[in-house]
Structure formats: structure tokens, C-alpha cells
Image (cartoon, grey):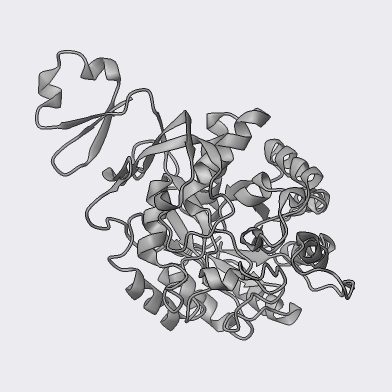
């Protein structure tokens, strides 16, 4: 594929045969970018990213997160309402978030709002201000400023969201009293895994299903790790539940059996489960039971990972992968019969539908933003620390070899990344999503 750009870097696509031909008038005044036989696809839309700015910019920030996104072919991210301080749970806090993001983003950025106890009256103002929807936790979130909700909080929030067309995202784990052997080694991954069994996801998802059916509000399960709830999810959908589900690159690529003792860079919540469970996630993805794949990029500073002690019980639970989602998915997916069209569907088209960007992003057609990723699905590369663009380089993927090298990223017709080089200044915008009613 060959791309042609004018002086303003607004890109137009032409067949290579035309570029090699004699139509000089068509090309006069344009810059030609010959990308050879690379694949040109809609830019990746990662709708689950923790940027952490303002308040925890030592963990991550808009400048570093969106550079990592651009280097990975991600043209739009949707920022989670935590772990920033303040969280995006009030209109005032959202305006502060927008001020912080201004002028720092190399890709476009939309925003989720948050549901916490007592903020139900903030939800409609946040919707009118342009958030994509809302996120809540049914279990401790890990940060004090974003407390988890109770059932009464959820009823209050659901009543507010009825008729808005918005969506409520759930961290789907409920606390269960599990006995952990007193002498269990905190440096063994199995100790952490046993502390968060899949029954926690099962019970949370049943609660979500009941609420979804009662209020007819769109609901979404973030980062599904366990395969067991899939049957109840399918049954709920057949009963009319407006329910969607995502999983992540780490649940599809990492297995509990292969996590070394003390390797706390692998810790996330819900936890990475076993190989048999992973195989069922892949099957569900192929069958359409799981709608999309995201990064859940959740970075922190190295000290919070407790790499020195290797204590899984005390380490921060989050995995950084924003830059490598496309090759992570493709490396494994090609071995399981997935095609390029599946990549577009699972990493772009379904994610934009969730966050109401499906009339603007995720497709190459007239009227849509010219957001493109240009990549080589056959090219292998090894992840080196020097090539990682998110702020803290702690990731379980360091040193592994992947297939699918991103050559260039185009945002609204402008080249923002090409072969290790970024545009000189951030060109991304904050996206405010118009409120809609049903």
C-alpha cells in the first residue's frame, strides 16, 4: 500500500499501481509515503486504559501513555476514572482531568466517568459533559479515593442511567471469604491465585445480570478472567440483557502455570488463571461470547510492584501492555485460526461501539476519522526496555518475541508515528461524546 500526503499531512490512500503510473497531476504537491506490502487497518481503539493523571503522574501520564499508544498503532484510548487524583466522579473533577490532558496527547482520548457511593446525582451532568459512560467496582478498587459500591448504590445509579443510552462498566469480583493456609508462601503465585478464585467473578456477574435485566441499562463486564461465567452470560443475553464482555491481552497470553515465584510483574486483578481456562477464553472469543480485547493498561512505579521481596500479596495489581496489544493478540491469534478481519472487529469495531464512537472511529470509510495503523503481520521483534514508551518499564512481556511490527500510525489523516519516530508535538484531541437518549 502507498500513502500520499499533502503539505498539511492529510493522508490519501491510492493503489500502488496508480502511484507507479503516470498520473502526475493527481500527485503534484503531495508527499509519497511508500509502505510497501504493509497492512493498512483502522487504528486500534483501546477502551480500557489507566492514565493516572492528574495525581499519580509518577505512575503514568497523558504524554507517556499516548506516545506508547501511538507506537502500538492505537489511535484512540478511553481513560479510566481511577487511579487519578481526583477521580472522574464529579463534573468538577472531569473538568480538571480535561485541563490536565490538554496539549499532552499524541492520540485521541475519551474518558469514562466513575460511579462511587453517593455520586448518583453527578452522573447525568457528567454524561452531558461528554464522558463515554461509567465504571464501578464491586470490590475494593485498590485506591481509597474510588470506593466500591454496594447494591443500594447500584440501584441508585441504575435509576439515573435509565433512558440515557449510557453504559455501566463493572469490575466484576465480589468479596468471598476464602481461607488461605497460614503458612502459604506469598512469593508463590498460587497463593495469590487461591485468594481470588473464579467464584468471585461468578457471584459478581450474577449480580450484574440481575441489575441489567431489571433496569434495561447497558452493562459491560471489564477484564473477564474466568471462563466459568460465560454460560450464565449467554443465558442472560438470550433473556434480553444488554450485556457486553471484554477480556485482556494478559488473560489470553499468560498462564498461571508459567508465572515464576516472586515475579510480581505478572500480578493483576482478577488474577491470570490456568491454561485450561485460557483455552476456553479463546474459544469464547472465536464464538462471539466475548466481544472485545483491551489492554487494561494499569501501570505503577517499580517499588509498588515489590519486585525486591517478590510478595504477590502486597504488590500493586496491574499490567502494562498498551504499546503491545496488537502484536500480543496477533502472535497468539494466528495460531488459533483468527484472521485480520477479526483483529479489526475485536480491537477496533467492538471497542468503539461500547464507548459510542462507532460513527467516528474504527472504520475506513467516508465521514470517519482517518485513523490508521500500518503494520507488518509477518515481522518478528523482541521487546527491549529501550523501546518501551510508557513511563515505567515494568511489564511481564519484557524480552519476549512477538509477530506484528507497527510501522506507522495515522491520526485523523496526520502521521503521528513512524518506525520509532514521533510527530514533533502532540496532535491528539480530547473527545467529548454527545449524550444520547433512547
Residue 195 vs residue 148: left or right? right
Q: How many marks?
A: 0
Residue 345, image x and y in percent?
A: 55, 39
Residue positioned 34% across, 45% down in the render? 369
Residue positioned 82% across, 48% down in the render? 231
Residue 277 vs residue 244: left or right? right
141 shown above or below 404 = below
Can residue 39 be seen at all in this image of the molecule? Answer: yes
Residue 370, image x and y in percent?
A: 33, 42
Can residue 345 be seen at all in this image of the molecule? Answer: no
* Quadrant housing the C terminus: bottom right
Residue 249 vs residue 411: left or right? right
Residue 106: quadrant of the picture:
bottom left
Residue 181, image x and y in percent?
A: 90, 72
Q: Please state which of residues 247 and 326 is positioned toward the viewer in this rendering.
A: 326
Residue 289: quadrant of the picture:
top right
124 shown above or below 411 = below
Outermost bottom residue? 118
* Quadrant housing the N terminus: top left
Residue positioned 49% across, 81% down in the render? 90
Residue 238, image x and y in percent?
A: 78, 48
Q: Please state which of residues 267 and 97 is positioned toward the viewer in this rendering.
A: 267
Amino acid at each position: 500500500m502507498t500513502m500520499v500526503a499533502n503539505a498539511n499531512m492529510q493522508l490519501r490512500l491510492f493503489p500502488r499501481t496508480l502511484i507507479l503510473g503516470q498520473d502526475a497531476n493527481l500527485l503534484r504537491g503531495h508527499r509519497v509515503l511508500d509502505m510497501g506490502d504493509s497492512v493498512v487497518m483502522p487504528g486500534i481503539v483501546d477502551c480500557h486504559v489507566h492514565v493516572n493523571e492528574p495525581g499519580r503522574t509518577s505512575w503514568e501520564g497523558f504524554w507517556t501513555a499516548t506516545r506508547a499508544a501511538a507506537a502500538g498503532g492505537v489511535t484512540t484510548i478511553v481513560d479510566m476514572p481511577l487511579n487519578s487524583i481526583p477521580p472522574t466522579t464529579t463534573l468538577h473533577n472531569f473538568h480538571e482531568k480535561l485541563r490536565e490532558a490538554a496539549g499532552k496527547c499524541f492520540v485521541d482520548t475519551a474518558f469514562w466517568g466513575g460511579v462511587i457511593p453517593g455520586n448518583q446525582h453527578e452522573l447525568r451532568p457528567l454524561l452531558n459533559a461528554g464522558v463515554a459512560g461509567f465504571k464501578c467496582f464491586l470490590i475494593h478498587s485498590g485506591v481509597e479515593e474510588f470506593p466500591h459500591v454496594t447494591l443500594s448504590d447500584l440501584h441508585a445509579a441504575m435509576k439515573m442511567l435509565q433512558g440515557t443510552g449510557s453504559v455501566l462498566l463493572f469490575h466484576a469480583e465480589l468479596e468471598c471469604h476464602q481461607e488461605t493456609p497460614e503458612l502459604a508462601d506469598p512469593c508463590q503465585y498460587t497463593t495469590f491465585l487461591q485468594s481470588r478464585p473464579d467464584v468471585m467473578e461468578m457471584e459478581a456477574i450474577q449480580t450484574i445480570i440481575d441489575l441489567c435485566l431489571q433496569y434495561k441499562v447497558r452493562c459491560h463486564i471489564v477484564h473477564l478472567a474466568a471462563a466459568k461465567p460465560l454460560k450464565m452470560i449467554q443465558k442472560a443475553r438470550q433473556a434480553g440483557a444488554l450485556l457486553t464482555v471484554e477480556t485482556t491481552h494478559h488473560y489470553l497470553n499468560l498462564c498461571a502455570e508459567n508465572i515464576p515465584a516472586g515475579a510480581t510483574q505478572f500480578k493483576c486483578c482478577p488474577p491470570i488463571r490456568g491454561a485450561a481456562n485460557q483455552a476456553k477464553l479463546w474459544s469464547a472469543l472465536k464464538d462471539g461470547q466475548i466481544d472485545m480485547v483491551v489492554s487494561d493498561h494499569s501501570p505503577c512505579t517499580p517499588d509498588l510492584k515489590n519486585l525486591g521481596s517478590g510478595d504477590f500479596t502486597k504488590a500493586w495489581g496491574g499490567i502494562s501492555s498498551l504499546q503491545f496489544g496488537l502484536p500480543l493478540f496477533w502472535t497468539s491469534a494466528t495460531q488459533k485460526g483468527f484472521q485480520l478481519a477479526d483483529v479489526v472487529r475485536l480491537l477496533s469495531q467492538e471497542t468503539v461501539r461500547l464507548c459510542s464512537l462507532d460513527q467516528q472511529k474504527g472504520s475506513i470509510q467516508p465521514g470517519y476519522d482517518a485513523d490508521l495503523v500500518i503494520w507488518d503481520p509477518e515481522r518478528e521483534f523482541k521487546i527491549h526496555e529501550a523501546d518501551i514508551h510508557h513511563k515505567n518499564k515494568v511489564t511481564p512481556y519484557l524480552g519476549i518475541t512477538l509477530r506484528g511490527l507497527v510501522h506507522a500510525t495515522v491520526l485523523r489523516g496526520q502521521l503521528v508515528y513512524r518506525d520509532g519516530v514521533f510527530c514533533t508535538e502532540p496532535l491528539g484531541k480530547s473527545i467529548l461524546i454527545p449524550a444520547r437518549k433512547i
